[in-house]
Amino acid sequence: MKRNRSLLFVTLGIALLLATTQVFASPADMSNAQATPGAKATEKANEHATKRANKPHGKHENFKGIISAVDSTSITLTLRDGTSVTISLSADTRMKFPGPKTSTPGGIQPGMKAMVQALRDQNGNLMARKVMIIPGKPTKIHRVGIVTEYTAGSSITIQAKDGNTYTFAITGETKLLPAERAGTLAAGSRVTIIAPRDPASGGVTVKGIVIHPAKP
């Protein structure tokens, strides 16, 4: 009889110990139990979906036209059919200018031709991914006049036939033509300024100064 009671007490003790172990399981054990491969995969899928929701989506849309307005937040193009489209700019928008990579790009200005690659956000608004300025043909400027001021290697000012005064910057690449008259260039000389307009920046660079012979 006593042996049966001892076995009963031992059995009850083991059952009580098991129940206590399940109730007081540590949070770390519970966390490890939840961190199954399936749970991790679900968590990664949720993170990926959240990232995609916060990014523009859909196919790239390309727009080509003349810039009619531009500021730090958006760019507006006038398309070939006469319609306009406004596209938002952000810190992630890449700007591409024509010319060598080592050159300093000029500012984007109305009147320039551009192509914009864009995506639509969740609300259907266009977001610019890339803005590419399209170079046009250089516009040649020929100004004939009398030199009023001249600083070698720096600048030249002439009074043109139309009565207006024009000042041009001179660089190390500016050629004085013909070379044998280069030493005669001074105030009072009659010259022709050859200065193509840069289609990317809108600026003017003097390529050559033709020095006409002095009148007898």
Image (tube, rainbow, N blue to C red):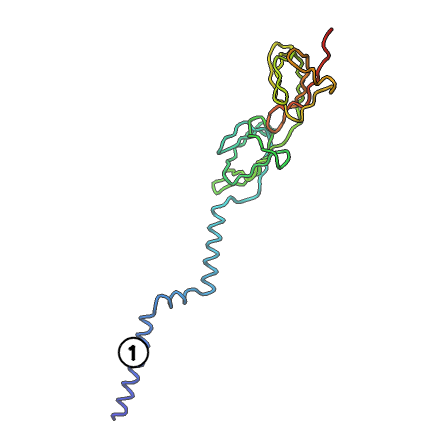
Q: Nearer the viewer, residue 160 or 12?
A: 160
Compare residues 84 and 106 and report the one nearer the observer: 106
User: Residue lying farthest bottom?
Assistant: 1
Question: Against 110, is 100 above or below?
Answer: below
Residue found at x 48% / y 49%: 51
**In this figure, which residue is indicated by the disc labeled 1?**
16
Residue 1 rendering spot, x and y as whole percentages: 25, 93
- Image point 60% across, 13% down: which residue? 165
Depth check, front residue: 209 or 41: 209
Residue at 31% over, 81% down: 14
Look at the numbered disc 1 and give the secondary structure of its residue.
helix
Judge from the rendering whether residue 106 lies leftward or rightward of residue 8; answer left or right. Answer: right
Residue 199 image position (x, y, % from top left): 63, 27
Q: Crowdedness of circle 1 by 10 Å Cα count: few (<14), some, many (20+)? A: few
Q: Quadrant for the C terminus, please.
A: top right
Which residue extends farthest top? 216
In the visual, does 121 lie left or right of 29? right
Percent position (x, y) of residue 5? 26, 89
Task: Give the amino acid at mark 1.
Answer: Leu
The image position of residue 85, as x and y in percent, is 54, 32
In the rendered image, which quarter is residue 114 located in?
top right
Count the labels in the image: 1
Residue in the picture at 58% in, 33% down? 104
Q: Quadrant of residue 161?
A: top right
